Image: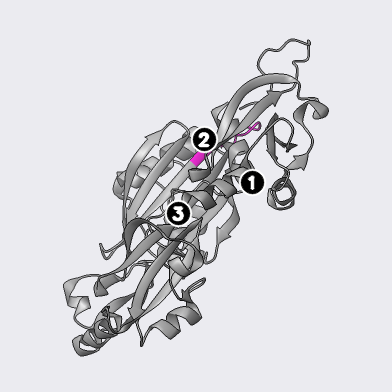
């Protein structure tokens, strides 16, 4: 039942099951579905064994270090510290048993700093924990066969997942690792001289009198940053969504909190986050408001269950257009007439949306648990 609810809620939100990121603005990630012929117990055990480094296993991608953030049966959140010890990525794995005895896994790795390219690091974070001997990976206990279905994964070169760079002090004297903006390891390049590094730091320096205000809108919030006039034109050109100006000019006048962008060895840049006044927020809430007389019934079928959602008539057309599997109507019209339970979708500051889960009647007409494996 927990697995079915997870799939329904994820689909209704049209979002990936990712750990989230503390980055302000765009950040690299990789989300995908992976199917295995082996049972989920074997897949979980193999991943756990590699995370622990059992039987001499080590991360083949620059010898990063894995750790467990939290775990329970059927789900785990992991972290990986990059081989140069500078950055940490987070990963989520959710395991679903399939009717043929195999396992379907929703997996996502997400960078925790603002980023645009990651040289396949987020993909490798996941891939290296289950890949088998057939593709050149070292195995601890179970040699797993798998198929990957990429969802949102910009870079996914498996060949880079088994490349180790030398991060020793001797090597650092002649070369440094190129760190892309996500903090992931990249190719080896000549070491940057300290004078050049200081020049870059000076270009990034912020001051009240010699910087350009930039803003970016994201997820109902607005972020202000004051960036050196020398760098601001490049930030606008290459930074998705960044525009010259400030949040207050866009109606985001209520201070929310301060955040920072990790610029690697150059330090951190301050970002101030604003939100719109409550009056504007109330208008948005009204669009999401559910009522018996002013909402459209939507449903979605998944894994032998059906989820009903009554969504504002103003939003329903967009939900059916962009929400995978969402259709106008209700579960009862599809033969799912037995109430199972209520669930809710967290819509952030807009509150929660109610979802009602139904199942089909049992073959004998009773309302016992559905036959489908959940």
Q: Which residue is mark 3?
A: 109
Asked if the stretch drawn in magenta spans residue 98, the answer is yes
**How many angstroms separate mark 3 from mark 2 (CA)?**
19 Å
Asked if the stretch drawn in magenta spans residue 316, the answer is no
Residue 287 disc label: 1
Q: Earlier in the sequence, mark 2 or mark 1?
A: 2
Tell which of 88 and 22 is nearer to you: 22
Is disc 2 placed on a helix, strand or loop?
helix
Query: Compared to 248, does 137 lie above or below?
Result: above
Is disc 3 placed on a helix, strand or loop?
strand
- Observer-side mark, 2 or 1, equals 1
Residue at the image position 49 percent from the left and 51 percent from the top: 108
Question: Is residue 43 among what the camera can see?
Answer: yes
Range of residues picked out in magenta: 94-102
Query: Compared to 117, does 45 lie above or below?
Result: above
**How many angstroms separate mark 1 from mark 3 (CA)?**
33 Å
Residue 23 falls left or right of residue 30: left
Q: Which residue is mark 2?
A: 40
Residue at the image position 41 percent from the left and 64 percent from the top: 223
Q: Quadrant of residue 256?
A: bottom left
Q: Earlier in the sequence, mark 1 or mark 3?
A: 3
Is disc 1 placed on a helix, strand or loop?
helix
Assess disc 2: are there few (<14), some (14-19) or many (≥20) residues with their C-alpha within 10 Å of its C-alpha. many
x, y percent for residue 72: 41, 32
Quadrant of the image for the C terminus? top right
């Amino acid at each position: 039942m927990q697995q079915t609810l997870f799939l329904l809620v994820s689909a209704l939100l049209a979002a990936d099951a990712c750990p989230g990121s503390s980055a302000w603005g765009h950040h690299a990630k990789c989300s995908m579905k992976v199917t295995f012929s082996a049972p989920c117990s074997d897949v979980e055990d193999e991943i756990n064994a590699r995370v622990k480094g059992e039987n001499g296993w080590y991360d083949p991608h620059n010898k990063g270090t894995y750790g467990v953030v939290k775990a329970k049966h059927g789900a785990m959140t992991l972290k990986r510290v990059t081989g140069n010890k500078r950055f940490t990525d987070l990963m989520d794995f959710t395991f679903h048993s399939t009717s043929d005895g195999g396992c379907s896994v929703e997996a996502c790795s997400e960078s925790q700093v603002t980023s645009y390219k990651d040289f396949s690091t987020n993909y490798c974070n996941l891939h290296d924990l289950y890949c088998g001997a057939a593709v050149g990976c070292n195995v601890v206990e179970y040699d797993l066969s798998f198929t990957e279905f990429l969802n949102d994964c910009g870079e996914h070169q498996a060949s880079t997942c088994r490349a180790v760079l030398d991060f020793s002090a001797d090597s650092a004297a002649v070369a440094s690792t190129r760190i892309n903006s996500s903090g992931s390891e990249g190719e080896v390049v000549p070491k940057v001289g300290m004078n050049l590094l200081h020049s870059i730091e000076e270009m990034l320096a912020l001051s009240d009198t010699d910087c350009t205000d930039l803003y970016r809108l994201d997820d109902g919030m607005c972020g202000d940053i004051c960036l050196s006039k020398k760098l601001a034109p490049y930030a606008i050109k290459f930074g998705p969504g960044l525009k010259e100006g400030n949040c207050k000019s866009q109606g985001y006048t209520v201070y929310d909190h301060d955040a920072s962008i990790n610029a690697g060895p150059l330090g951190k840049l301050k970002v101030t986050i604003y939100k719109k006044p409550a009056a504007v927020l109330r208008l948005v809430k009204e669009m999401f408001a559910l009522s018996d007389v002013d909402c459209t019934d939507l449903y979605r079928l998944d894994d032998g269950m059906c989820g009903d959602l009554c969504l504002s008539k103003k939003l329903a057309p967009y939900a059916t257009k962009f929400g995978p599997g969402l259709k106008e109507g209700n579960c009862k019209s599809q033969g799912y007439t037995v109430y199972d339970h209520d669930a809710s979708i967290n819509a952030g500051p807009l509150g929660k949306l109610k979802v009602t889960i139904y199942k089909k009647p049992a073959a004998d007409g009773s309302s016992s648990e559905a036959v489908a494996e959940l």
